[in-house]
Image (tube, rainbow, N blue to C red):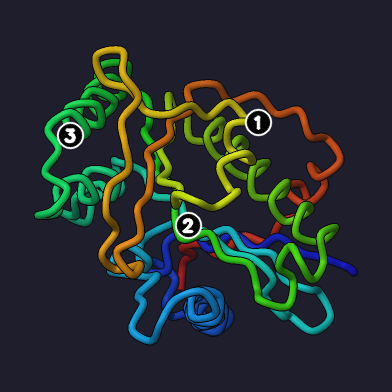
Amino acid sequence: MDLQLVVLNNFYDCSYNNYAKVHFGNIIDLKIQGYSTRYNYGVLPFNTSDYFATHFSVVEKNSQKMLMTYKTLSYSRCQQFNQTFPALALVMEEENQNQNHQKAIQSAITEAQKTKTELLYHGGFTIHPDYRRKKNKKITHLLFRIAQMCKVNYALETSSSCALVFITEGKKFHKYFTENNYQNLEFAGENLGPVTVHSIASEKSRPYISRCFIQSDEQVEKYWNERIVLAKMDR
């Protein structure tokens, strides 16, 4: 299968681009397909932040069928659009009023500001139902490897000091992160527990953080080198 990595950098800035419009629509469509196979009708795997996030997607070159997508948001871009950083928003929801979670994330924000580096949040990871683990383990594994490679390269490209992600409890996704320098977010030396994500059927998700970005998967680096970037251009 001939795959292509496509990076949509802030749809807000390139909504006039017809290809970007189609691509953004395909991202939303894949999220609905992917999450609807696991959750009941009404699950919302997207929100306002999708309009200004950086989306990383893998498509099949010939058919343009989208196999995988996820989004990344930086703290600075959230500030540009007057939006709360997603990791902080999650722990500030009414049922998630855990002060330790808020303090730990605020500490990461303060650290990034002091060192004049970027802070990232990754979310919305979705694989097309046709390529899930049980149906095609080889493709599933490749898509995870590409996603992890993108996380590292984007962190290095944006001079990021750390990245946060929330991983659903009971799923096996956490191993792909712990194997790539992600650790349970801590406060005062103790691992922080899961929070409730209401838009995703009130799932319990646990916060993880990475402060080490080392690219070691050279076999998938070609997808980054050959990526298509959709971003703001002069009209």
> Which residue is found at the position 88% from the left and 68% from the top?
2
Residue hosting label 1: 179
Residue 142 left/right relative to 113: right
Q: Position of residue 173 (x, y in %)?
A: 58, 48
Whether residues under marks 3 and 2 lie with C-beta atoms below 8 angstroms apart, the answer is: no
Marks counted in the figure total 3
Above or below residue 2? Residue 30 is below
Give the numbered dot on residue 71: 2
> Which residue is found at the position 69% from the left and 51% from the top?
144
Q: Nearer the viewer, residue 38 or 160?
A: 38
Q: Nearer the viewer, mark 3 or mark 2?
A: 3
Cα separation, mark 1 vs mark 3, equals 26 Å
Q: Position of residue 16 (x, y in %)?
A: 43, 80
> Which residue is found at the position 54% from the left and 21% from the top?
212
Q: Pick out the residue farthest to the top.
A: 189
Q: Nearer the viewer, residue 92 or 174?
A: 174
